[in-house]
Amino acid sequence: MQYRTLGKTGERVSILGFGCMRLPVIGDNPVRIDEKTASGMIHTAVDAGVNYFDTAYPYHSTNFGQPGASEPFVGKVLREGLRDRVHLATKLPSWLVQSRADMDRLLEEQLKRLQTDRIDFYLVHSLNQGYWDNLLRHDLFDFLEKALASGKIRYAGFSFHDELPLYKRIVDAWDWSFSQIMYNYLDEDFQAGKEGMAYASARNLGTVVMEPLRGGTLVNGLPEAARSLLTRQGSDWGPVEWALHWLWKQPDVHVTLSGMSTPEQLAQNLKLAGEVNGSVWGEEEDRLIARVKQTILEKQRVNCTACGYCLPCPHGVNIPRNFSLCNDFHMLQDLQARGRYHGLLTEEARASNCIQCGECLEKCPQQIDIPTELLHVAELFS
């Protein structure tokens, strides 16, 4: 296992982190964790050197408004002699905060659910413009400073789901220790992206990467042409190997969270993390990934560059974000895009709120028939 120092925290963390959002479950019930299998996987991971475990308040619940089964389960397993061998990360559910007191209450609840007196890495969960504005109104920084001073949390960071300019503003707003961003070879320029990661690194913030396989779609949803490119003569690498090695070759990626749901996935990830020092990555590999990326992008439905010229929509529709989710579905057969459409976009921001006024048409440099495509998005995700 290879380790890196997570920014200004100075903590030595494994490059492979265990994401506890997708633990094995019994049947199709997301709240019924297969405790025997999942416990065995966590013990195996720790014994192999994985020391960063990430969970959150709503993981393994039926909806993000409710506390899930992940935190209590992870807390119970770590009590089996593992707690002092790992860094435990969880997150403040931003969307549930309606007052300053809510933050204190939620942190206390999470400490009890995790059966611990401290949380090593505490993140403000899923920041976007709306959550950020609300948290600032309720004195977020006072909460974090007091939680740090009390020892209930050791380091404070945030996870992010919005555009690059907001990411930079949040990085500069307070003395954070680290951030967590969505990043993979297809989403190099999406949300915070590579530029945001470099911006954070220049300020000595650590970077934790989520969605390295894009929820599995960079494995299961790859177009056949892209999959064929990744099968090279003389190489036994497949889609997982290429995606993870692409991330691990970058020194600013400190932890890569993998949501492993089976012992087989864990074994594969551990093997790869153990081979990083011996792997070779050069210009030829970069060119191959660029070709794979282009092959995937050719499958996109809407040629939207997210320039934002069409905004603001007079009715509040987030046009670029709707098109991004639509392209996710078409490029990688990403069935989870529907969940993100309903979960990450407000009702006003969804394509279904488009009234076909056409005001956006003359603003689009790509000359996209925006109203027609928004109709498609609304029908696709309805």
Image: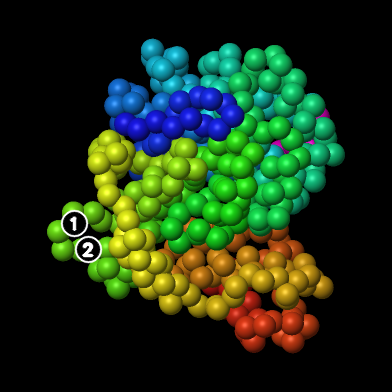
Asked where in the image residue 13 lies, by quadrant, the reply is top left
The answer to whether the residue labelled 2 contacts the one labelled 1, judged by CB atoms less than 8 Å apart, is yes
Q: Specify start and end residues of the magenta stretch as a single range.
A: 96-100
x and y percent of residue 234 in the render?
14, 59
Q: What mark, if any, has residue 235 been given in the picture?
A: 1
Q: Which mark is residue 314?
A: none
Compared across the picture, whether 202 is left or right of 274 comes to right
User: Residue 3 location, x and y as percent?
Assistant: 39, 31
366 or 27, which lies in front? Answer: 366
> In the rendered view, would you say 302 is above or below 202?
below
Picture residue at 45% right of the left edge, 54% below the top: 184
Q: Is residue 372 left or right of residue 61?
A: right
Density class for disc 2 (Cα within 10 Å; few <14, some 14-19, many ≥20) is: few
* Residue 71 in view of the camera: no
Q: Is residue 161 above or below residue 100?
A: below
> Which numbered tag is attached to residue 231?
2
Q: Say which residue appears at 27% left-offset and 36% top-offset.
A: 274
The answer to which image quadrant residue 339 occupies is bottom right
Quadrant of the rendering where the N terminus is positioned? top left
